[in-house]
Every structure is written in C-alpha cells, then in structure tokens.
Image (cartoon, helix red, strand yellow):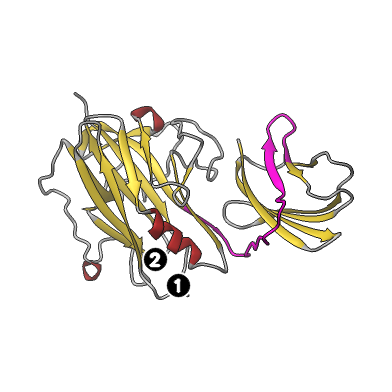
Amino acid sequence: MKNFSLLIVCLLPSLAVFSQEYSFPLYFEDAVGNKDTLIFGFDQSATTGVDQNLGEANLLGQPYDSTFFAFFTDAANSDDLDCRLEKEKIPSYISKKQYSSDYYIEIGVINHHWPIKISWKKNLIDSYEQNYSESSMHVILTSWNPPGGWFDSFCCGSWPGGFTSMSDTSGIQVGMNNFCRYKTNFSTDSVSLLYVGFIYYTEAIQTKANEKTIKCWYSKELQSLCIQPINENAVYKIDLLNFWGTKMLTKQISSSGNGPINIQMNHLPNGLYFARIHQLKPNSSTFSCKILKR
C-alpha cells in the first residue's frame, strides 16, 4: 500500500512582548490504532531551525517507523508553493519537538491507513488564546494556504467546514482527500499538505454580555456581509478586518425595520474576516463575529 505524508504548517504571530513559553501536544492516530505525538509551541529564543537548547534534535537520516510517523520539517519553508504543488520539496531537518518565535512550523505524517484522527488538549488552546487579551487570538486547522493568502482559493484539498477552530473542539478525523499533495526527495510517496494557523489581529474586540446578540454571516449570493441587528432604528459603526488584522473597510449605517443590514464585499478577496460591530445608538454595545468569504 502506498504511503502518504501529512504536512502541517503552524503560523505563529510575532509575540515578543510575552516571556511565557507555550507548548501544545498534537496527537495522531491512524485507522488501525497506530499513534504518535509531537510537541510544538512558542518561545522567544526559538529560531526557524533546530534549537538544541529547547530540546529540538535533527533526526533527518535516522531510522523511523515507516508505518506511522509524525515529524516536524521545513520541506516547504524555502520554496514558493504553486497551486498544483508540482515542485519537489527538500527538508533540512526532521524533529519531534519544535518551537517558534514568529515564523511557521511544518509537520509531516507518514501514514498507510486512512483516515487519521488529530487531537489536542483544548484547555491548553483556550489558555493560550485567553492570555492574549489585547489581541483576538484563534488557533485553527485548515487544508491549504494558497499563494494569495489564507482561504483565497481551495485549489486542492477539502477541509471539513473550511477550517477547524481548536478552541471549539478537541479533535477531528480527516481523510486523504482532505489534503493537497506533492513530491519530496526523502520519500517516493506523495506528501499531503495541511496548516495549523494562529489567527490574530492587533485591535481587541470586546463583546459585552447582552440578552440579545447581533448575528452576522456572509451571503455568497449577495456577496455581502449580512448583519441582523437587535434594535430597530439603531446606528452601527462596522469595521471589517482581514486574517492579518488589516482594516479592510469601515462603515457607519443605520438599521431600518427588522431586516438584515447588507454590506458589499464584492471588491474584497476571498478569505477569513472578522467583523467588529459597534452599536452607537440607542445604547453603546460592541459585538464581533468571524466570516469566511469563498
């Protein structure tokens, strides 16, 4: 049976103002019960390579379990990823533990038996997100990061629901068809590509406790951000931020009746967005939501 390798990339924001080290175990299990575990995380002193002072070791060239083996690598770090993934990827290291300060980490899994289950400790993800109160932080899994940016197109792979928020659940089961694949020089088998991403933006979003909550969603038919207000004749200021926290539009609008407010997004690229909604009148409240335009 042909092997396939799963590759995960962790995008870590630059968080040098924090001194605490964060680490997370990722658990992998194939369809017949083979298991493996990796440790990844954040440390200010970490580099994009192997840091022996952090317990990282280069295992490249050493024997490994070819039945089921999870590992960190940099096979795709230095190469421009084309949508068809036709270029060969060449790693300089393989490790079981990897920390980063402000870069990304790749993870490969050699597997004979699909599907596989990826799981994690949800309470650790929750703690990590909550400790960055001045930024809105979300840790996600998704299948593809196209050249134009996150979620710009799904040229291959099909992640369930588009992405998985790791603070919403403790695991997910995925099959070979959920991933993009490419060739590499350390294996004659295909390599499948996945990403773990740290979504953040620099401006905090504070949501006040209310009996009613504003709902928002993306309408593909209207190509609009749709917002269901909680008050008639209310005045709202709406900021829309992209994946990296860049403000893409600001708009002040009044609601009329009970229908939703529609804000055109046809001029914006596909991707993950965060809407910060300030109700200015009749009272002051702030809400937030995330939407996926695709």
Q: Main secondary structure of the magenta part?
A: loop
Residue 210: image location, x then y, percent: 70, 57
| Above or below for 259 versus 73 | above
Residue 71: image location, x then y, percent: 24, 48
Answer with left or right where residue 136 lies relative to residue 140: right
Answer with left or right where residue 1 lies relative to residue 195: left
Name the residue located 54 percent from the left edge and 35 percent from the top edge: 153
Q: Is residue 48 visible?
A: no
Q: Is residue 187 visible?
A: yes
Numbered label attached to residue 38: none
Give the Cα separation between the discs numbered 1 and 2: 7 Å
**Is 263 in front, or is 91?**
263
Q: Residues within 10 Å of mark 1 (few under 14, many from 20)?
A: few
Answer with left or right where residue 148 lies relative to residue 158: right
Can residue 134 be found in the magenta stretch? Answer: no
Can residue 222 be found in the magenta stretch? Answer: yes
**Is 93 in front, or is 284?**
284
Q: Are dots 1 and 2 in contact, CB under 8 Å?
A: yes
**Is 257 in front, or is 159?**
257
| Above or below for 196 versus 154 | below
Residue type for callout 2: Ser
Q: Which contiguous range is marked in magenta? A: 198-225
**Is 20 in front, or is 120?**
120
Residue type for callout 1: Ala
Name the residue located 23 percent from the left edge and 29 percent from the top edge: 113
> Looking at the rendering, in which quadrant would you find the C terminus?
top right
Numbered label attached to residue 101: 2
